[in-house]
Amino acid sequence: MKRILVTGGAGFIGANFVRMVLDEHPETLVVNLDILTYAGNLENLKGYTDNPNHVFVKGDICDPDLVNELVDKYEIEAIVNFAAESHVDRSLVEPGVFIQTNVQGTLNLLKIALDKKLDRFLQVSTDEVYGSLGPEGYFTESTPLSPNSPYSASKASADMLVCAFGHSWGLPYNITRCSNNYGQYQFPEKMIPLMINNALNDKELPIYGDGLYVRDWLYVYDHCTAIWKVLTEAEPQTIYNVGGNNEKANLEVVRLILDRLGKPDSLIKHVKDRPGHDRRYAIDSSKIMGELGWKPTVTFEEGIVQTIDWYLDNTEWLNHVVSGQYQQYYEDMYAGR
Ligand code: NAD
Ligand code: TYD
């Protein structure tokens, strides 16, 4: 794969993916389309904006003229769609923008991918489209979609549109559904960087409900290698789950963070639960491991230490993002909790 349009490549996972591709697959041209919402940050691409194989364009995936122009101008062969509104809590406050970007935006990209006969459309999705698990079992690729939050409903809608374009008109697509990512450049509204940032500032750590909600944690670099493998090696019309095999309860993760930072457990504060909070996500990645030979390389114990140390070493980045709009959002979200 030589010429790809990456959307949302200034966000957390997208920026890690762009950096990995430019470092490890230098024969690739990456056109990076990102509107730079509160979550998109060019500082995530520091050192890469001048790379001759990287073209950054500030713009909207919902804009057909712009996307058509980029596909033509750069002779794009494939689209990798990371662009999204990605935070569940925000979707519970303002679902409309999730439908606009995650559904309408994906539809716009799909139409263009079909029209221009691109070789591949890769949709970066989430395990949250499958809904919630009880204490046992795992999501497989054939688990029925049963999303519970406006965020996951918008992602499931997009997945279904992708499949419909494949089924109806033969669009060559892939969908990857991964578990919770963590690592460098994650915006501190998601649990792990939020807790690191609060602990560093001796602020309370807001645990929703009993804190026994379980997530499977995937180191972001491992997710990026999975996407690259699917993009370059998978058959079209296929879906792959991508998990870290690292199930942890939220309280356990937060205690690890406090321990590493030498901060007391007394910073933990149980706050009002998230409405409709999914109890447990766990993913069966045997398909991608068996068919494409992918496997996660970083254990949670290693990854969480690397992540905490990265935030400690990048306080300037952290201070820049924890300001302005994000600060106001934070006050609104946690007021009265
Ligand atoms: P993020 O919120 O950090 O980044 C999203 C990026 O998309 C931002 O740079 C933003 O500016 C950009 N964007 C938003 N609306 C846009 C628009 N209309 N046009 C162009 N760009 C736009 O998200 P992330 O955590 O990096 O997630 C990336 C993808 O992975 C998303 O599709 C998300 O659903 C999926 N995903 C994330 C996780 C996770 O743990 N973070 C887990 C599973 C799946
Ligand atoms: P989050 O990072 O928002 O990811 P998702 O909801 O998409 O899984 O949250 C991860 C878990 O942490 C989830 O169970 C909600 C919980 N959580 C808290 O307890 N407190 C917080 O302040 C946040 C942001 C999340």
Image: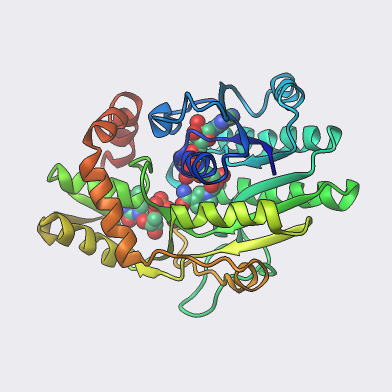
Spot occupied by residue 336 in the image (x, y as percentages of width and height): 26, 42
Is 312 in front, or is 46? 46
Examine the rendering and report whether any part of residue 149 can be seen.
Answer: no
In this rendering, is residue 163 above or below 145?
above
Q: Residue furthest front?
A: 27
**Residue at left 16%, top 45%?**
200
**Residue at left 86%, top 53%?**
167
Spot occupied by residue 196 in the image (x, y as percentages of width and height): 24, 49
Q: In the visual, does 39 lie left or right of 199?
A: right
Q: Residue furthest right?
A: 169
Is 282 in front, or is 72? 72
Q: Which residue lies furthest to the bottom in this view?
A: 136
Spot occupied by residue 246 in the image (x, y as percentages of width and height): 41, 69
Spot occupied by residue 32 in the image (x, y as percentages of width and height): 58, 30
**Residue at left 48%, top 40%?**
19
Q: Quadrant of ligand 2?
A: bottom left
Is 199 in front, or is 57? 57
Residue 286 sits in which quadrant?
A: bottom right
Q: In the visual, does 83 lie left or right of 144?
A: left
Residue 84 sits in which quadrant?
A: top right
Q: Which colour scheme is used?
A: rainbow
**Residue at left 69%, top 60%?**
239
The quadrant the N terminus occupies is top right
